[in-house]
């Protein structure tokens, strides 16, 4: 009994310890998404600190190149670079992987900005790449940013549209947020919005979003160049298919060249041009050379048949003459080459 009680206390101690360790940790609020989608601006807004994370226009690559974190009131805000930049893809992937391993208490968000009213497949691909690196159970959110009033209207009234959009993802978001395009932010550096409705809906969304427990051991490396890999695989499989098609065509050509349209030719000694020479039976044991004279002397008329074919390449292939009949019964009275055969 005593042993049981002490075991129980040990268990309790472990539970408390784990809880304290976890609750002492900061909650990680991380933003992922392609360059310029507004990650840094949104995080600075949450921190109520303009330029908390530098934001603005960057022409060649994303402004944020490494993952950065700033902790305010027990919340660790994590800014990450976008994956879209092909040159720094590997680096960005490493940075993102690292950011996923920072906090066991974790809320991941993807920031997606439609351009020309469309959500790019690149944005969706980025989400998928990150999702594949974390366990299925991790809840994540999508923030659709810089939406026109028309898009907000469409997306709000037509939830089927959102559902079908989310079907291109390896798993759907737990929740998503639609944020309007703020005029005051257009092309600004280190500015956060003053729009209270915008701020409130963002803060509410992030605060109410459930926390995940994400031990870093469960984070897998990102397969960042998935698109390139897929493209390469596709190219290789196309090449294989092409070679296979060529091989098959060659095989068919060969088959056709060697194909054989059969027909039979028949002759008898009387009419055949072989009459004089005789069909090619002269070397066969039991037969002899046949001459016209023999026939006139009352030899039974034999027939000769052969099966020929016209091949695919137009050439004729001649078969062997097959001798039928009763020549064996014939005896010969005259021929220079007569031999005693039977
Ligand atoms: N119009 C409008 N502009 C915004 C909004 N949010 C951010 N921006 C602007 O978009 C530009 C890019 O925003 P950032 O926050 O730097 O984007 P980011 O995702 O951090 O970009 P990288 O660090 O390059 O990956 C800045 O000029 C912002 O002022 C928004 O809701 N509406
Ligand atoms: C944003 O809204 C939250 C609560 O909704 C508030 O606490 C915060 O001060 C606001 N931030 C700004 C910059 O106005
Ligand atoms: C088949 O015949 C065509 C036409 O005669 C020729 O060009 C081709 O080389 C032949 N192919 C083979 C495998 O023999
Ligand atoms: Mg940034």
Image (cartoon, grey):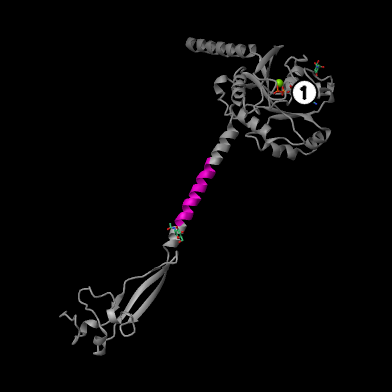
Residue that mark 1 sits on: 202
Q: Quadrant of ligand 3?
A: bottom left
| Residue at x 56% of width, y 23% of height | 218
Q: Is residue 255 left or right of residue 192?
A: left
Q: Total label count?
A: 1
Is 161 drawn above or below residue 131 in the view shown? below
**Magenta segment range?**
236-251
Between 96 and 22, which is closer to the camera in this rendering? 96
Whether residue 309 appears in this view of the structure is: yes
Extreme residue in the bottom direction: 297
Residue at 67% over, 36% down: 121
Magenta span dominant secondary structure: helix
Rendering coords of residue 211 (x, y %): 66, 21
147 to 271, vertically: above or below? above
Is residue 243 a member of the stretch shown in magenta? yes
Q: Nearest the camera: 95 or 87? A: 87
**Residue nearer the viewer, 272 or 57:** 272
Is residue 85 within the magenta segment?
no
Residue 59 % position (x, y): 72, 25
Residue reaching furthest front?
336
Q: Helix or strand or loop: what does disc 1 sit on? A: helix
Could you tell whether 54 is left or right of 225 in the image? right
Is residue 207 visible to the viewer in this orientation of the structure? no
Q: Quadrant of residue 212?
A: top right
Q: Residues within 10 Å of mark 1 (few under 14, many from 20)?
A: some
Q: From the top left corner, tell me how far across and down residue 113 is, in percent.
A: 74, 30
Mark 1 near ligand 2 (CB under 8 Å)?
A: yes
The image quadrant where one finds the C terminus is: bottom left
Q: Nearer the viewer, residue 169 or 270?
A: 270
Relative vertical location of residue 251 with respect to residue 211 in this rendering, above or below: below
Question: What is the quadrant of residue 229 in the picture?
Answer: top right
């Amino acid at each position: 009994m005593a042993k049981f009680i002490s075991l129980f206390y040990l268990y309790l101690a472990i539970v408390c310890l784990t809880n304290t360790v976890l609750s002492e940790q900061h909650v990680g609020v991380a933003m992922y998404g392609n360059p310029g989608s507004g990650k840094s601006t949104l995080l600075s807004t949450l921190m109520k600190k303009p330029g908390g994370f530098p934001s603005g226009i960057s022409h060649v690559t994303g402004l944020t190149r490494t993952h950065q974190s700033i902790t305010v009131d027990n919340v660790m805000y994590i800014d990450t670079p976008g994956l879209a930049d092909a040159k720094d893809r590997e680096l960005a992937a490493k940075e993102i992987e690292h950011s996923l391993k920072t906090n066991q208490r974790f809320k991941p968000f993807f920031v997606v900005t439609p351009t020309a009213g469309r959500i790019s497949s690149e944005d969706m691909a980025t989400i998928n790449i990150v999702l594949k690196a974390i366990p299925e159970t991790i809840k994540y959110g999508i923030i659709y940013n810089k939406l026109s009033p028309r898009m907000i209207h469409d997306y709000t009234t037509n939830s089927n549209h959102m559902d079908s959009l989310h079907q291109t993802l390896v798993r759907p978001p737990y929740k998503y947020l639609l944020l309007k395009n703020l005029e005051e932010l257009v092309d600004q550096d280190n500015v956060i919005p003053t729009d209270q409705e915008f701020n409130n809906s963002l803060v509410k969304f992030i605060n109410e979003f459930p926390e995940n427990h994400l031990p870093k051991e469960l984070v897998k490396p990102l397969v960042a160049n998935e698109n390139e890999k897929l493209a390469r695989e596709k190219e290789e499989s196309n090449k294989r298919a092409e070679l296979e098609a060529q091989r098959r065509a060659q095989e068919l050509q060969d088959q056709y060249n060697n194909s054989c349209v059969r027909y039979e030719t028949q002759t008898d000694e009387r009419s055949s041009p072989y009459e004089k020479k005789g069909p090619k039976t002269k070397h066969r044991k039991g037969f002899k050379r046949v001459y016209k004279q023999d026939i006139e002397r009352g030899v039974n008329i034999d027939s000769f048949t052969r099966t020929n074919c016209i091949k695919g390449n137009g050439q004729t292939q001649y078969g062997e003459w097959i001798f039928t009949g009763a020549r064996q019964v014939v005896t010969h009275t005259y021929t220079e080459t007569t031999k005693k055969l039977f």
